[in-house]
Amino acid sequence: MSQLDTVNRILDAAEVLFAERGFTETSLRTITSTAGVNLAAVNYHFGSKKELIQAVFERFLTPFTESLDRELNRRESQAQLQVEDLLQSLYRVALAGLAREGRDPKRFMRLLGLAYTQSQGHLRRFIVSRYGASYRRFAGQLSGALPQVDPVTFYWRLYFMLGATIFSLSSFDAIEAILREDFGAVSSLDETLARLAPAAVAMLTAPDVGAA
């Protein structure tokens, strides 16, 4: 087995196990057993469990942010950016692009949700340091397309939108199963993203009723 094969087997096993069980609940021994490698291989290639977690995210975030940045570059030439256009860049280009790269967007959302609900400060610091520029660029352009929304309201609406996105996609299989059982309908990931975009637009552009 080549070193690249070993690395990929470890990453593949870690990605699935972290998404299914969480970071703290998944031991390195479980990962190595699933991957069919010894514990020394993880230490040699990654150094620690924290660095392995970061490497799992890197496989998602690098193609995701590269795709998003290319789309934002293309849209910057437009006279006036619209909220709808920016969310299409996020959903239909960047997230859908993960699938074309062989990465599962639903699993990515599960992992991203875990990053903010489990005690993984190192991971949040890693994401901000490595990919924060892309996030700030997207958020800045989105804020610029909503000049009527004050910064505090925009902050909350952005996180409401991201939270709805993470929940909807990370729980996609369960939600789709309920849809089939209750309505006899099926929905693909592309169809779900197409439905999610206008809902997110409405969330961001709704009239501000003010704080209670």
Image (cartoon, rainbow, N blue to C red):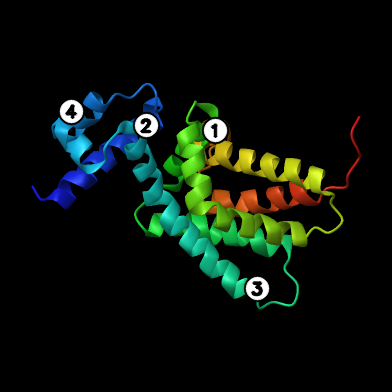
Asked if residue 84 is positioned above or below residue 27 in the image, the reply reads: below
Q: Residue 76 carries which label?
A: 3
User: Amino acid type of disc 1?
Assistant: Tyr
Q: Which of marks 1 and 2 is nearer the N terminus?
A: 2
Q: Residue 8 carries which label?
A: none
Task: Give the spatial CA distance, label 1 vs label 4.
Answer: 27 Å
Residue furthest toward the left?
1
Q: Name the residue under label 2.
A: 18
Task: Give the spatial CA distance, label 4 vs label 2.
Answer: 14 Å
At mark 2, the secondary structure is helix
Task: Give the spatial CA distance, label 1 vs label 2.
Answer: 14 Å
The answer, for residue 187, to whether it is visible in the render is no
Q: Where is residue 183 in the image (x, y as percent from the top left)?
A: 58, 36
Q: How many labels does the image show?
A: 4
Task: Give the spatial CA distance, label 2 vs label 3.
Answer: 37 Å
Q: Which of marks 4 and 2 is nearer the N terminus?
A: 2
Residue in the picture at 41% in, 50% down: 60
Q: Residue 33 carries which label?
A: 4
User: Amino acid type of disc 3?
Assistant: Glu
